[in-house]
Image (cartoon, grey):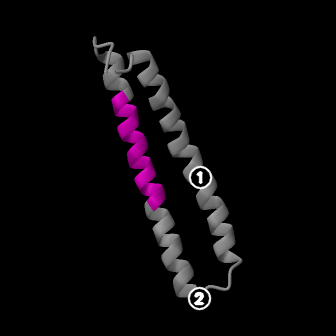
Amino acid sequence: MITRTDLLKQLHKAENSEESVIIIITGHLSQAIHNSKLKSEEQTKIIELMQKLSNDSVGHKAIILDLIQSIKESDRDVY
């Protein structure tokens, strides 16, 4: 079991991680891909996959923010 305060702290950490990690990783990978000797088609496929990952991350962040809001509005203190 976890208290509301502790759960909110963990969700805020998840929110921050979701956003910052994806930005950092995609930036580094994009640079590495462009400097690689991969074929153009392979580079394009990897970049498309990274864009999907980035888009999914936006969705994950929205879900986390919805959870945070729901927990804040709840009277429940133990989860």
Position above or below: 25 against 29: above
Determine the residue positioned at 52% across, 74% down: 46
Number of marks: 2
Task: Give the Cα separation between the discs numbered 2 and 1.
Answer: 24 Å
Q: Quadrant of residue 66?
A: top left
Most extreme residue toward the front is 1
Q: Height in image: 2 above or below 36?
A: above
Q: Which mark is residue 50?
A: none
25 shown above or below 32: above
- Label 1 secondary element: helix
* Amino acid type at mark 2: Lys
Quadrant (top left, top right, bottom left, bottom right) of the N terminus = top left
Residue 22 image offset from top left, x and y in percent: 55, 52
The 10 Å Cα crowd at callout 1, few under 14, some 14 to 19, many 20 or more, is: few
Residue 24 locus on image (x, y percent): 63, 53
Q: Residue 11 location, x and y as percent?
A: 45, 31
Q: Residue furthest left?
A: 75
Rendered position, 16 above or below 47: above
Question: Badge 2 is on which residue?
Answer: 39
Which circle's residue, 2 or 1, is located before the other in the chain? 1
User: Could you classify mark 2 by the number of other residues whose Cα lies within 10 Å: few (under 14), some (14-19), or many (20 or more)?
Assistant: few
Mark 2 lies on a secondary structure that is loop
Q: Quadrant of residue 3?
A: top left
- Say which residue label 1 marks: 23
Name which residue type carries label 1: Ile
Was residue 32 drawn as part of the magenta stretch in this picture?
Answer: no
Residue shown at the point (36%, 25%) measured from the top left: 69
Residue drawn where x is 34% and y is 30% of the image: 67
- Pick the quarter of the image with the C terminus: top left
Q: Magenta region's main secondary structure?
A: helix
Query: Which contiguous range is marked in magenta?
Result: 53-67
